[in-house]
Every structure is written in C-alpha cells, then in structure tokens.
Image: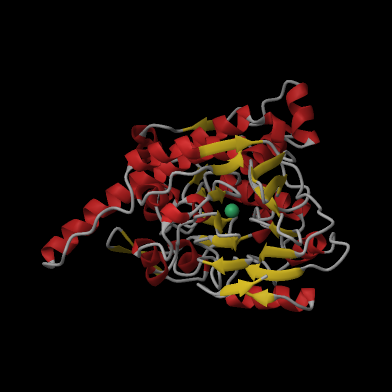
Amino acid sequence: MKLKFFGAAGIVTGSCHMLKFNNKKILVDCGMFQGRKQTSMLNYEPFKFDPKEIDAVFLTHAHIDHSGLIPKLYKHGYRNKIYCTAATKDLCRIMLEDSAGIQEFENKWDNKRLKKQGKPLRQPLYSVADAKKCMKLFKGIQYNELIKVFDDLEVVFRDAGHIMGSAIVEAFVLEDKPKKIIFSGDLGQWNAPIIDDPTCLKTADFVVCESTYGGRTHEPMKKRDQILIDLIKTTYKNGGKLLIPSFAIERTQELIYTLNRIAEKNLIPKIPIFVDSPLAIKATKIFQQHTENYDDEAVNLLAEGDNPFEFPNLTYTLKTEESKALNEMAEPAVIIASSGMCTGGRIKHHLKNHMGKPNTTIFFIGFQAQGTLGRRIRDGTKFVKIYGKSYKINAKIVDVEGFSSHADQPQLMKWLNCFQTKPKLFIVHGEPDEQAALKKAYKSGHIAKLWEEVEL
Ligand SMILES: [Zn+2]
C-alpha cells in the first residue's frame, strides 16, 4: 500500500492524498490551493494523475481547500463516486457553485490583462456547469455508518468537530494483512458551539493528521467571548465599525450563535449586526436543516424554541443594494462578511471603506494563510492594495485564534493520545513550523512533502 501527497504538505491548502493498493487509487479530498500566487497557480497545472484512473473519492468536508478542485476532477473525466456526509454534500452544492462563479469572473479579468500583454488566454479552472454536474457523483452518508466501497475497502466517517458535516475518514484496507489508515481531515476544537466534539478513535496502523495549529495554543473559549463583548462595547461607544472577516461556513454560524447567546443575556448594547455574505446566508439555512449534527446544547436551545440564528438587531443582507447601503450608514455597527482571509467577497469593500478610520476595528477570528490580504493586514502592514488602489490602514487590528475551528496543539495531542497503541503519524496541512512542532510534541512522525510517495 502506498500513500502520496498531492497537496497540503508544507502548506494548509490543496488537500489531496492518494491511497494506492491492489491496483486501486483512492483520493482523500481534492482541494484548491490558496494563498501566495505561486501556490494558487498550482491549480492551473494538470493533475499529476489521470482523473479517469481514480476509483473513489472520500471528501472530509466542504471547505474549498479540501473540495475546491472536484469540479476540475469532473471536467477532466472523473465519473466514480464521491463519498461524504449528507451535510457536506449540501454545503458543497453552494460552495462549489460559488467557487465556479469566482473562477469564471476572475478568468474574464485575467484574460483582459493577458490580451493587453499579447499573451495567450487562459481557460477558467472550471465552470458553473462543471460545478453543477459533479454534484451527481456525490453520495451523502451518515456518521458512523460502515460503507463497503469495494471487496477490499471499507470506510467509516466519524465526526471531526471542525465544521458542519466534517469527517475523519477511517479506512480499512482488507489486503492479506488488513490495515487501518485514518485521515483526520481538519479537526475542530472541543466544546465548540453548535456541532459535536471530534471523535476519539482507539486503533489505527497509520494516521494522516492535520497540523494547522500544530505549535500553538488558543485562548480559552470563555476569554474569547469576553473579547467579543468588549470589542462590541468599544465600537458602540466610539461610533465606529467592527469588521469581522469570516469564513462563510461554520465561523459565521458559530459567531451568530455566540452573538445570539450574549445578546439574549444583555451582555452587549443594542448595536446593529449585519451578516453581509450571500454564501454565509445560504450556508446558515443548511445549518438549520442538519440538526442531526448538533451538540446537546444546540439541540436544547431548539427544543426551548430559541432559533440560535435569529435575534433582534441581526440582519442578513442578501442583495447587493443592501450591502452597498451599509457604506452610507453613519451609526456604529458590526459587519460580518466573507471571505475569511479577505481574498474576495464583500469584506474587501468594507475594508476599503472603513480601514482608514481609527474608530474601525478589524477583528480576525480565523486562520490567515501566508500571502493573503488578511495575513498582510493582520501582520501590521500600513498600506494595502485593493482592486489596484492603495489604502492606508488606521483601524485597530485584533486577532484571536481561539475562535478558530481548528484544534490547537493541546487538542491535536488530545486526539492523537486517544490511540491505545501509537500509530505511525504522517503530518500534513500545516506550514513547516507547525508541522515540525506537532512532530516534536508527538515525539515521532513523518512530515509530508508535496508530491512525495511513501510506502505503508
Ligand atoms: Zn477546513
């Protein structure tokens, strides 16, 4: 049996790992590369395998850095099944179509520039039509259901506690000597709002584990709520704006859920709160449908008749005109908008309009990959370019990693320590320092390198 890493090795994006055994090729995730230009350009290179030769795909969750190249896989001939949880399937339907829309839009702009420079034009990575068509390959399953994929392969998807529908893939390869390999996908934090905790698994021969925060420790959850309360109070007092770049899936819903809780306890002033992201609004609807994945606290809230995604002062702005109207708004407000790393979406417009003002606060609640606009702002750059124009930053920058939907080092170790006999560890999905830190904490492990193949 062999394992090959086609992405998310030394970086946190482009997750794609191939398992090879008995002449079969299985992919776990097929994600998009994001961040620095040299990284995102990898999306345009042909796959380093023939998509027609892949026998099955297991998708851990709907985030684009795990699912974003599935329409490209379809475009280049993949027609077998894509296994994921039912919630992931529903989320992918909106995520992939949105991603395709961005691809088509950006391609038009790129081609205008290339034409001017007399260079050959480029095809979009994939079209909205590809994103729609690939959905027919998706097979939504439930957590903890044993799936016999082939005579020599069984899998179980376990809750990874990272985002709605996120899964750990437990694969049983039934060769002469059966072997069990576990792909962590992205692991969440224990006691995160709405969804359940990551599943503790006791046995495995091999574990492929993420390491996004392999060397860091998050602030405790209680402290992070207080930070949010304090920031809202300050914004209310100084008449400014609190801008929160947020990932459309999970981050935004957890934030709304938390705001619902603190607003109902009257811990914050009556300040207008806007969720300004069409994708996040659609995703919130899907969250409301998949109550089977809720944790006890969220189930109890629903049973008491409290819809955690609705409360006074909260407005979802779906239409472009509604979003634009926020620019004219003089009073203090909280604006939650995508994308989480400020690489696109409506947050760029709000940054442009407000980050020059000292009474604006930009509140980062998620991971900011190297090379992204979010990372540059977070790291303290004084000027940034948005849509070709330079803007000065006078806003206050606050960064709280405790809001992340990724486990930190103590939590990754908690999950790894569930195994009764130490499995062989392959460390993926982390920048080099984080990969190295997790290896040190685990006291062994193999740091995966891009396009490397290892024998299991
Ligand atoms: Zn993720």
> Observer-nearest residue: 402 or 294?
294
Image quarter of the N terminus: bottom right
On the picture, is 392 further left or further right than 416?
left
The one nearer the camera, 102 or 332, is 102
Check the picture and name the quadrant holding the C terminus. Answer: bottom right
Q: Nearer the viewer, residue 331 or 408?
A: 408
Residue 271 seen in the current view = no
Q: Which residue lies furthest to the right in this view?
A: 420
The percent position of residue 105, horizontal first and vertical second, equals: 28, 48
Q: In the rendered view, tell whether residue 69 sits above or below residue 433.
A: above
Is residue 361 visible in the rendered structure shown here?
yes
Give the colour scheme of this rendering: secondary structure
Question: Residue 107: image x %, image y %?
Answer: 26, 54
Above-or-below relation of 393 to 242: below
Q: Residue at x 39, y 66 (%)?
A: 42
- Tell me which corner region of the image, top left, top right, bottom left or bottom right, holds residue 383: bottom left
Q: Where in the figure is residue 132, as x and y percent of width and height?
A: 39, 37
Q: Tell me: residue 66, above or below residue 278.
A: below
387 or 105: nearer the viewer: 105
Q: Position of residue 128 (x, y in %)?
A: 34, 41
Give the residue drawn at x 59%, y 56%. 366
Total labels: the figure holds 0
Q: Residue at x 56, y 62 (%)?
A: 17
Q: In this view, does 279 lie to the left or right of 128?
A: right
